[in-house]
Amino acid sequence: MPYRLYLCAGLHCAARGPGTHATLEHALWEAGLLGAVELHLSGCQDHCDHGPNLLVQPGNYRYVGVTPERAAAIIARHLRDGLPVLDWQATPELRRKAP
Ligand code: FES
């Protein structure tokens, strides 16, 4: 099953990583996966203080703090090599707190 990526386009994530979409596209191209992986924008993923956030399906892997370096590593290690990067996964305590 091909991977589907959902990059949070909510206000907080967009402000924290305005170039993340382009960085992911470039990393997909470098890994030879452009066209083989769907890259979508999503609404808020409820981890606003730790963005940019990226959900990878299948598997429901939610990455937080997707810097350009992490984006390249996620594409190479998770999508190309099939090894999710567990150190950068969202955890319940990182969820946005109710007001
Ligand atoms: S704005 Fe991205 S998780 Fe809320």
Image (tube, rainbow, N blue to C red):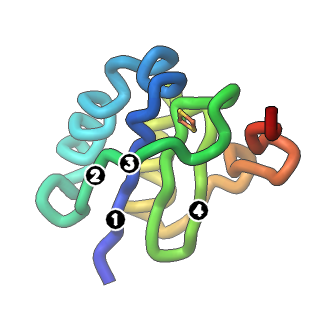
Q: CA distance from mark 3 to mark 4?
A: 14 Å
The local crowd at label 3, few if under 14, some if 14 to 19, many if 20 or more residues have their Cα within 10 Å, is some
Q: CA distance from mark 4 to mark 1?
A: 11 Å
Residue at image point 27% right, 50% down? 31
The answer to the question of whether label 3 and label 4 lie on touching residues, with beta carbons closer than 8 A, is: no
Number of the label disc, if any, that sits on residue 42: 3
Number of the label disc, if any, that sits on residue 16: none
Q: The residue under label 1 is which amino acid type?
A: Arg
Disc nearest the viewer among 1 and 3: 3
The local crowd at label 2, few if under 14, some if 14 to 19, many if 20 or more residues have their Cα within 10 Å, is some
Q: Nearer the viewer, residue 81 or 52?
A: 52
The mark that comes first in sequence, 1 or 3, is 1
User: Number of labelled discs?
Assistant: 4
Q: Is residue 87 left or right of residue 8?
A: right
Tell me the SS state at disc 2. Answer: strand
The local crowd at label 1, few if under 14, some if 14 to 19, many if 20 or more residues have their Cα within 10 Å, is some
Residue at mark 2: 40
Judged from this view, the residue extending furthest toward the bottom is: 1
Task: Indicate whether 51 appears above or below 43.
Answer: above
The answer to the question of whether label 4 and label 2 lie on touching residues, with beta carbons closer than 8 A, is: no
The local crowd at label 4, few if under 14, some if 14 to 19, many if 20 or more residues have their Cα within 10 Å, is some
Q: The residue under label 2 is which amino acid type?
A: His
Residue at mark 1: 4
Q: Is residue 19 left or right of residue 38?
A: right
Disc nearest the viewer among 3 and 4: 3
Tell me the SS state at disc 1. Answer: strand
- Ligand 1 rendered quadrant: top right
Residue at mark 4: 61
Judged from this view, the residue extending furthest toward the front is: 99
